[in-house]
Image (cartoon, rainbow, N blue to C red):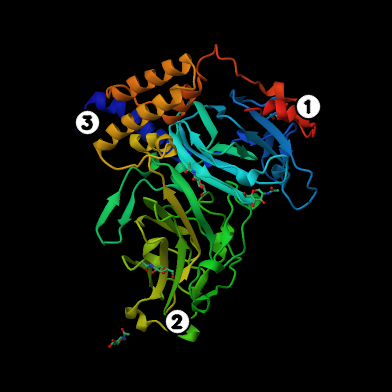
Amino acid sequence: MLSSSHLVFFPFFILIIHFSSLLILSLSESDYTRPDKYFIACGSKSNVTTNERQSFVGDRAHPPFFLSPGRSKAIITDETSNDMSSLYKTARVIETPSSYELEVDQDGTYMVRLHFHSFPSEFNLSEAFFDVLASGYSLLSNFSVRTQSVEEFLLPIKKGKFKLYFQPSQNSLLAFVNAIEVFLVPEEDLLPKSAQLITLDGTKGIQSDLISLVYRTIHRINVGGKTVTPESDFLWRTWLQDDGFLIKPEAAKKSQYYDGTLKFLPGGSTKYSAPEYVYRTGRELNVQADFSKATWAFPVSKSANKHLVRVHLCDIIGKALSVFDFTLFIYNKLERTIDAYDDIGNLQSPFHLDYVVDTNGSGFINISIGLVASNNWSSVPNAYLNGVEIFEIERTSSIAVFESPLKQNGSVIGFGSFVAFLVIIGMLISVLMVLKSKTAKFKRYAFQFLYEGMSSDRPKIDKVEWALRREGFEDTTTSTKTSLDDDDGSKYGDNDSNTSSTQFST
Ligand SMILES: *[C@@H]1O[C@H](CO)[C@@H](O)[C@H](O)[C@H]1NC(C)=O
Ligand SMILES: *[C@@H]1O[C@H](CO)[C@@H](O)[C@H](O)[C@H]1NC(C)=O
Ligand SMILES: *[C@@H]1O[C@H](CO)[C@@H](O)[C@H](O)[C@H]1NC(C)=O
Ligand SMILES: *[C@@H]1O[C@H](CO)[C@@H](O)[C@H](O)[C@H]1NC(C)=O
Ligand SMILES: *[C@@H]1O[C@H](CO)[C@@H](O)[C@H](O)[C@H]1NC(C)=O
């Protein structure tokens, strides 16, 4: 029986339930708004707008961020080709370690997209080999660009200062970048909290805590459709065609384009997961020609640790719900029965499945769709695939943070705690070597670093800090600071050779 006090609280209780359900509603996808910063056109004096995209702020147009000290220079191409994005007509060439320092106002998962286009200039940009680091994480190491490349990462960023740090690799004189995007994404639409683990030796498990990892986009594929350009994707992603990855092209044909309404259901994909176009196009088995299986092979790095694989599905070929099911394979290790009825509950309803795939050594992630034998009750057995995303999961242990400087000094990396010891020894040797030619100030920083690196109870110093200390950047008295305004005028699009020689004397 309810006491009187219960009776008093009961309406409140209802109210609380009511409000919390409102809260849950309001926290769902609708509360994500696309941020308007940070989109940076490097080396540009004016703001750049490309097609219907976000406007990019020129890093010399009084931007709302800070470009750290370090020798860098804005360059501009004289190429006048119209089909080249205006983002790729300017670049910032970086000769000594420099960072873009952004102010992030919310914890969350961020997309970091870096654009590189190596155009002819006074520098040979194809000869640049460089590292890119983000506060605490190594994003690219000894990276180089033949012609053009867009590198994309998803990473957890905490509210506060976020530094994106560029440094030429050893033996290289320059780094460069044409444009930078850093923006918050709706993480629950892009990343699963956990996913089934698939290993080549067949061991099974669940990988959890996936939100806290760092991802590099390797493949983003619109199966059976045309390339989707950034203007057509809510998060400005590019989705490429699958033709080059399908091992036997005749095994799977393009499905008929679906132009009806897609039914977005709870538990399935959202408009942020992939553009509708990805789900409206797809491939199905060429059953008329007796193909019962089709395989796509996606090249991945042999040295990569693990990948997150997202398979996008939407039954646009079934004439009725549950007239067939089929099997999704990853290598021959995963065999998952797909049934639109069980998996999402309706036809034309986009959904996706996530797997963490161990790829050590094989160099490919192979994804197949195939008929299931038990389907012979169905008059129209088939199988389909609409999209694939593959992300490399970056190593982010504290050891990895120290990996790159060591590698640059030619040392060998091993595993376990012994590595930590080697790291210290390696650094000691390199520090001693460098000390001969450097100042007493450097000595102070180097030893401070070694001391802090060895005492295990201190928070780890990230590589960026280390590199900054190595350069003496944190010391405000070393006045190598160049403000953005300093490089205005003479250096911008100006072929005056004496300015470049004074800027780049070594
Ligand atoms: C570029 O855009 C930023 C941010 O919108 C603005 O503050 C700045 O004044 C603009 N600069 C120019 C040169 O238009
Ligand atoms: C730039 O460097 C690349 C790689 O070393 C070389 O193949 C190319 O010829 C160079 N281009 C120019 C214009 O010097
Ligand atoms: C994946 O496909 C590639 C390319 O066809 C092939 O060489 C490789 O053996 C396949 N790997 C596995 C594990 O099936
Ligand atoms: C098809 O079904 C029949 C019975 O309905 C069964 O005997 C046969 O093995 C099935 N074929 C396949 C390929 O599974
Ligand atoms: C970077 O890559 C180039 C070309 O692959 C190689 O020659 C060079 O030794 C590498 N440098 C470092 C520091 O790993």
Placement of 372 over or under 83, stated as above or below:
below
Name the residue: 44% across, 77% down. Answer: 382
Pick whichever, 82 or 453, lies toward us. 453
Placement of 456 over or under 215, stated as above or below:
above
First along the sequence among labels 1 and 3: 3
Q: Which residue is mark 2?
A: 291
First along the sequence among labels 3 and 2: 3
Amino acid at the residue labelled 2: Phe
Residue 440 shows in this picture:
yes
Residue 29 shows in this picture:
no
Placement of 347 over or under 398, stated as above or below:
below
Label 3, label 2: how many angstroms apart (C-alpha)?
67 Å
Q: Decide if ligand 1 comes within 8 Å of the CB at mark 1.
A: no
Q: Position of residue 152 (x, y in %)?
A: 53, 45
Amino acid at the residue labelled 1: Ser
Q: Residues within 10 Å of mark 1 (few under 14, many from 20)?
A: few
- The quadrant holding residue 343 is bottom left
Numbered label attached to residue 377: none
Q: Are marks 3 and 2 in contact (CB under 8 Å)?
A: no
Q: Position of residue 407 (x, y in %)?
A: 41, 39
Name the residue: 60% across, 33% down. Answer: 38
Q: Which residue is mark 1?
A: 490
Q: Nearer the viewer, mark 1 or mark 3?
A: 1
Q: Which residue is mark 3?
A: 2
Q: Position of residue 85 (x, y in %)?
A: 72, 47
